[in-house]
Image (cartoon, rainbow, N blue to C red):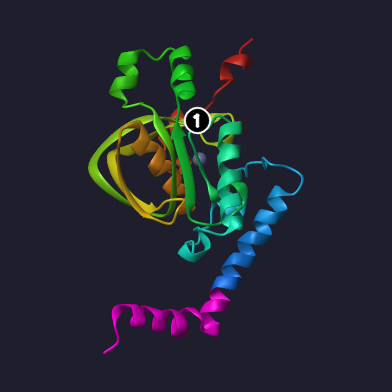
Amino acid sequence: MFSATRRAKLFVKTVLESPKWLNILTRQQSSWMENLKSIIVGSNVPKVRQIGDPVLREVAQPVDPMTIHTAEFKKLLEVMIKTMREHQAVGIAAPQIGVGLQVFAMEHTREHMNRLKEMGFTLEDLRQKQMDIVPLKIFVNPELKITNSKMVAFREGCLSLEGFSGMVPRALEVEVRGLNENGEVVTWNASGWPARIVQHEVDHLRGNIYIDSMTYKSFMNNKWNDFVE
Ligand SMILES: [Zn+2]
């Protein structure tokens, strides 16, 4: 019998170093690295892909955990976070910058809270919607489990459908499990507004956009009022 360490080493040697496995790794890396290279050339903040772009309708590929520590993957995260912040968004999924991998980032900052207050949300509204500060979170290969299926509708927008919004019913509470930016397994239970962000971003990784599940008649141009003479 081999010891666990010896077995693990053998596994690495026989499986991970086999030409087939290397091929899969190289193929996965090369496709998104190529994409990433073209995204970061000339600009630190790429354009956000807009609805109609096939990448937003494809199911994103799982990330090989072995690539999480590469400089290229760290660059991908950096670009995603920059893009999200540049647009003052609360979340972003990799396909939105043209990279079809299962990765999303989210955060809800003090600035987001202040903007909501400026829009007329009272502290009671914020409390009720569970709109609190959520520090930056990264999920790689996320799995979503609904832990409270009570549906709550609220208005959502998306960087890939700029200028529009719609009311989307979402489950009140979810559990999301995946890898973080360090490749560690993390499980997070979210409720209310953060749970909505998680569901919106995981939808992106499945090729779904909020308009697929919104109540259609609530769809609107956020500036419709500017067109009233
Ligand atoms: Zn979106």
Image coordinates of residue 89 in percent, x first then y, are 52, 32
Name which residue lies at 57% across and 55% down: 73
Q: In this view, does 115 lie to the left or right of 192?
A: right
Give the crowd class for mark 1: few <14, some 14-19, many >=20 residues within 10 Å. many
Say which quadrant the C terminus sits in: top right
Q: Which stretch did the figure color magenta?
A: 1-24
Q: In this view, does 2 lie to the left or right of 17?
A: left
Relative to residue 53, is residue 24 depicted above or below? below
Name which residue lies at 52% across and 57% down: 101
Say which quadrant the N terminus sits in: bottom left
Name which residue lies at 34% across and 82% down: 7
Helix, strand or loop at disc 1?
strand
Magenta-colored stretch includes residue 4: yes
Q: How many marks on residues?
A: 1
Instruction: Name the residue at the top extreme.
Output: 229
The main secondary structure of the magenta stretch is helix
Relative to residue 215, is residue 28 depicted above or below? below
Image coordinates of residue 202 in percent, x first then y, are 42, 48
Would the CB of label 1 be found within 8 Å of ligand 1?
Answer: no
Q: Label 1, on which residue?
A: 165
Nearer the observer, 55 or 225: 55
Which amino acid is tagged 1? Answer: Ser
Relative to residue 73, is residue 193 depicted above or below? above
Residue 153 seen in this snapshot: yes
Nearer the observer, 187 or 175: 187
Image coordinates of residue 128 in percent, x first then y, are 28, 22
Image coordinates of residue 27 in percent, x first then y, are 60, 71
